[in-house]
Image (spheres, grey):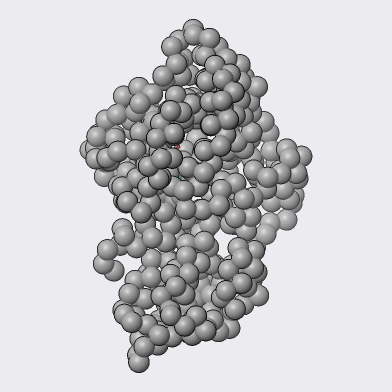
């Protein structure tokens, strides 16, 4: 496949959000992040591709709020680092690892570390981290899609220790259906390896406004600016609808019921014991620092362990395969198995031969699952046609139809 990176960027631009995270960790003064940023060779804030960038006006406003973002992202990084240290007998699975320097820190502590992220990220972070830590056999970076069980289970095959899976900055990008896939996958992994899963995203989403207010000296105008543009900026960089699942839309009660229904037990971890000595850009002992600490002391992460007594949702994974041809202006393809971030670039690659396409017919009889990355490819195909009536899906199964209905794709695809 040629232009692999370009195809990956098209099917799932969400990885762009991770670039600003490492930039903010470096601004906050983390030396490893600074070095890693140099090794990664990233340019300015918020991505590399012009069409994926946050619009200029929005970027200017975002910059006024840098101290808030720095505290939010750097605190998340440092608090999870501290937590990870306290689970010293576990192997660490960082899902998603983004471009952070956690692997470098784990290497120095002699820990076993798995950095899991989309291929667009792991292709860059793996070699960049190796420039700093050399060839450390305990540090692994693997290309995964969290909705794809095999992609995460395979790299963990030989792992003997219990796992500490940590998740920061991920769950807000998933639809409800994808979220359930991810929960089901992590449960299967923990059933096999033991250990637990720490989720920080809910705590940050319910407290981000309070943290912003603490950093911004309770200035109502600046806090309103933060609230107005933050989600828009993050959504633009990721090109998705953010926070569209129960973790962000439900009450604590509803969330706990959901987690239990997914076959987990949940325990709260108070953040008070894991706070860093200083919060990057905030002067130690300053009023801002004290206010921010107060907010964090009231926050809890969730630690999930498998509840063996509850039933598990079964996920059937069929291998992905696509066979296609392009003749007389018509592109036909037979698509089998899961179409997700890992597999969708191949589908898009095959479509590249359809120059001047007039009609498309896709046979989906054996498609078991399609994620937003796959739907994006279908949309690209649909948009390539002048006459939209020439777009035909054949044999769509009920479960794939349901995904299309939930995401609103059915309105134009059928
Ligand atoms: C906001 S970043 C956070 C990364 C890192 N935890 C940090 O704090 O910098 C979101 C990350 O989620 C990754 N991601 C998005 N969808 C994913 C999926 N389906 N499977 C695995 N990783 C995914 C993106 O590639 C990106 O690196």
Q: Nearer the viewer, residue 330 or 224?
A: 224
Q: Is residue 273 left or right of residue 74?
A: right
* 101 lies above or below 159: above
The quarter of the image holding the C terminus is bottom right
Residue 157 in sight in this render: no
Q: Is residue 300 left or right of residue 65?
A: right
Identified at 51% across, 14% down, the residue is 289
Identified at 57% across, 15% down, the residue is 291
Residue 139 lies in what quarter of the image?
top left
Q: Position of residue 140 (x, y in %)?
A: 36, 44
Q: Nearer the viewer, residue 273 or 223?
A: 223
Q: Nearer the viewer, residue 65 or 331?
A: 65
Residue 382 in sight in this render: yes
Q: Position of residue 218 (x, y in %)?
A: 58, 18
Residue 207 lies in what quarter of the image?
top right
The quarter of the image holding the N terminus is bottom left
Q: Position of residue 274 (x, y in %)?
A: 54, 21
Identified at 60% across, 46% down, the residue is 243
Residue 56 lies in what quarter of the image?
top left
């Amino acid at each position: 496949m040629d232009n692999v990176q370009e195809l990956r960027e098209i099917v799932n631009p969400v990885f762009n959000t991770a670039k600003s995270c490492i930039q903010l960790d470096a601004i906050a003064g983390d030396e490893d992040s600074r070095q890693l940023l140099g090794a990664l060779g990233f340019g300015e804030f918020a991505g590399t591709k012009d069409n994926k960038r946050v619009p200029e006006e929005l970027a200017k406003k975002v910059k006024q709020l840098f101290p808030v973002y720095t505290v939010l992202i750097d605190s998340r990084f440092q608090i999870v680092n501290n937590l990870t240290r306290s689970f010293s007998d576990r192997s660490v699975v960082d899902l998603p690892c983004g471009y952070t320097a956690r692997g470098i820190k784990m290497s120095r502590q002699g820990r076993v570390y798995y950095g899991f992220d989309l291929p667009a990220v792991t292709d860059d972070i793996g070699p960049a981290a190796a420039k700093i830590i050399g060839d450390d056999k305990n540090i692994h970076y693997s290309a995964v899609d969290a909705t794809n069980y095999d992609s995460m289970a395979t790299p963990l095959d030989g792992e003997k220790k219990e796992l500490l899976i940590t998740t920061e900055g991920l769950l807000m990008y998933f639809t409800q259906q994808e979220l359930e896939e991810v929960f089901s996958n992590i449960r299967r992994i923990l059933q096999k390896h033991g250990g637990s899963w720490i989720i920080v995203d809910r705590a940050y989403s319910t407290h981000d406004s309070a943290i912003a207010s603490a950093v911004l000296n309770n200035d109502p105008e600046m806090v309103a600016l933060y609230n107005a543009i933050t989600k828009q900026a993050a959504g633009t960089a990721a090109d998705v609808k953010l926070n569209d699942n129960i973790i962000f839309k439900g009450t604590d009660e509803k969330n706990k019921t959901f987690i239990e229904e997914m076959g987990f037990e949940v325990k709260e971890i108070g953040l008070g014991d894991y706070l860093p000595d200083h919060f990057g850009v905030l002067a130690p002992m300053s009023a801002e620092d004290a206010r921010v600490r107060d907010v964090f002391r009231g926050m809890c992460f969730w630690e999930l362990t498998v509840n063996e007594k509850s039933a598990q949702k079964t996920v059937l994974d069929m291998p992905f395969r696509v066979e296609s041809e392009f003749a007389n202006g018509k592109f036909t393809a037979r698509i089998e198995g899961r179409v997700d971030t890992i597999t969708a670039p191949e589908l898009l690659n095959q479509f590249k031969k359809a120059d001047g396409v007039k009609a498309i017919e896709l046979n989906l009889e054996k498609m078991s699952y399609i994620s937003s990355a796959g739907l994006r490819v279908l949309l690209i195909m649909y948009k390539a046609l002048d006459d939209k009536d020439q777009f035909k899906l054949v044999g769509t199964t009920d479960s794939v139809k349901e995904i299309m209905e939930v995401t609103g794709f059915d309105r134009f695809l059928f």
